[in-house]
Amino acid sequence: MTSLTYQVGVPAWEGGKTTLVVRADGAVHVDNERAGAARREYDGTVAPADVGALFTQAQALGLWTTARRATAVPDEAPVTLELSVGGVVAHRVDLWDNQLRQGPLAPIHARLDGIVRAVSGGEVY
């Protein structure tokens, strides 16, 4: 099974650390860990066609060849994205969150953020 894992944040920071796993069949899992708060987990689904569009967009926009900037700006969170095929990581990229939120990769962030918000009922963003 092919899946994309998106991890952003730091547990001790305001929004905590969020992990999203999107499988090719449309199954979605969101996990949010915040220091001093109960862990929140959500499961849901998205249309497999939407997952395919996400995977295609990531490839088309060059996500898997994007390099992390040498330094972060203040309060910029670390981001890790992995594409796994059959349980083996085929691609991994480590970025700062503004690299994903702004510029050419912004459409990928919009998709991922939309999935997190939808599956968590807006509780995680």
Image (cartoon, rainbow, N blue to C red):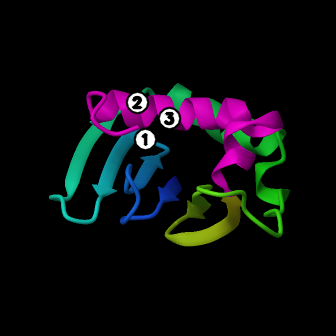
Which amino acid, mark 3? Asp
Q: Quadrant of residue 12?
A: bottom left
Residue 116 magenta-highlighted: yes
Q: Residues within 10 Å of mark 1 (few under 14, many from 20)?
A: some
- Residue 88, placed above or below residue 51: below
Give me the C-alpha separation between circle 3 and circle 1. Answer: 19 Å
Task: Give the residue drawn at x 49%, y 44%.
Answer: 24
Q: Measuring from the top left, give residue 117's x and y in whole percent.
A: 38, 31
Whether the magenta-drawn stretch holds residue 114 is answered as: yes
Nearer mark to the viewer, of 3 and 1:
3
The dominant secondary structure in magenta is: helix
* N-terminal label among 2 and 3: 2
Residue under label 1, please give it.
25
Mark drawn on residue 46: 2
Q: Where the C terminus falls, by quadrant? A: top left
**Residue range highlighted in magenta:** 96-125
Residue 14 located left or right of residue 111: left
Q: Amino acid at mark 1?
A: Asp
Q: Which residue is mark 3?
A: 113
The residue at 74%/48% (across/down) is: 99
Compared with 61, 37 (above or below) is below
Foreground tag (2 vs 1): 2
In the rendered structure, which disc, 3 or 1, sits on the residue that comes first in sequence?
Answer: 1
Q: Secondary structure at mark 1?
A: loop
- The residue drawn where x is 59% and y is 56% is 75
